[in-house]
Amino acid sequence: METQADISNAFAASDLFRGTDPSSVRGGFVLSFRRGQEISETQRGIECLGVVISGCLGVEASEGGSVSVTRRGGEFGICNIFVREKMPTRLWARTQSRVLFIPKDEFARLLGADPALMYRYVKLCNEKMIYLADRLRLISVSDHTERLYRYILTRAENGVAEIGIPKDELARQLRISRSSLFRALKSLEEDGRISVSANTVTVLPKAQQAAPQKGDPKKFDHQRKD
């Protein structure tokens, strides 16, 4: 059984609900999902948004081209609060998971009652729009090696990028085959542009000097966590 502390901890980890009192939410309910089980925004006949309390969820574009991971405090179903069209994504439990579902009508009420929540909601939606625009520009790069390199640059901080997903999922995000991914990694290493160690990729100094500078439209700013 979920305690108020479980939900409070999930809210504290949420970019959207951080600072919101869970007791102010009316009509919310928690459901458990076994590993591999698909998850719908429609629960008990109600359109809901979800907040992960425990476990790990996978989110995949309906055409199978992109996969992301949502953990405790992660939200889903927030981009279609005011338009009741289904999102073109598939959601499933990667591990045994528990999710708090909040009716979308209730969330709309909360937005009207809490200006700080409204601000966080608009900010989060804007970040998602920027992320999707960056994804579209990345996918438009036809050369697999260059596509991978630009993906690494979007993840790199101080020249180091952490690739926290399995290689097959990375290949799916980049819409290339697993074999093409490994060829691209090898090519970038042989060219002296990167160094790979486990899930850490270091952009080598020579490559950093050649990387697009701030303000260059070829640089892809990345603000999304996996």
Image: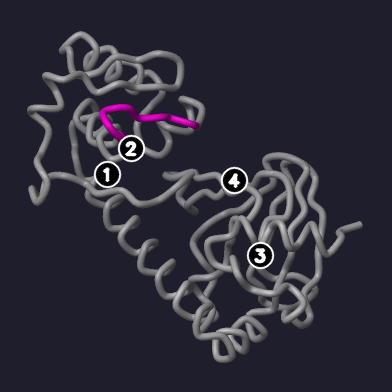
Residue 163 falls within the magenta-colored stretch: yes
Q: What SS does tag 2 mark? A: helix
- Crowding at dot 1, Cα within 10 Å, few <14 / some 14-19 / many 20+, comes out as some
Disc 1 is placed on an element classified as helix
Q: Earlier in the sequence, mark 3 or mark 4?
A: 3
Q: Earlier in the sequence, mark 4 or mark 1?
A: 4
Task: Name the element at disc 3.
Answer: strand
Give whichever of discs 2 and 4 has the lower sequence position.
4
Q: Which residues are magenta?
A: 156-164
For marks 1 and 3 on the same chain, the one whose residue lies earlier in the sequence: 3
Q: Is label 2 or label 3 in front?
A: 2
Query: Disc 4 designates what residue?
Result: 58
> What residue is shown with label 1?
139
Left or right, residue 195 beside residue 100: left
Q: Nearer the viewer, residue 109 or 191?
A: 109
Quadrant where the N terminus is found in the figure: bottom right
Kindly identify the residue that appears in the image at 22 percent across and 50 percent down.
137
Q: Residue at x 37, y 62 (%)?
A: 127
Q: Is residue 111 above or below residue 135?
A: below
C-beta proximity under 8 Å, tags 3 and 4: no
- The amino acid on which the numbered mark 4 sits, given as a three-letter code, is Gly
Q: Is residue 138 left or right of residue 48?
A: left
- Of the residues shown, which amino acid type is indicated by label 1? Ile
Q: Using the numbered discs, state the Cα–Cα distance from disc 2 to disc 3 in whole angstroms.
A: 27 Å
Between the C-alphas of marks 2 and 4, the distance is: 20 Å
Residue 147, percent from left and from top: 24, 34
Q: Which mark is residue 155?
A: 2
Q: Which mark is residue 50?
A: 3
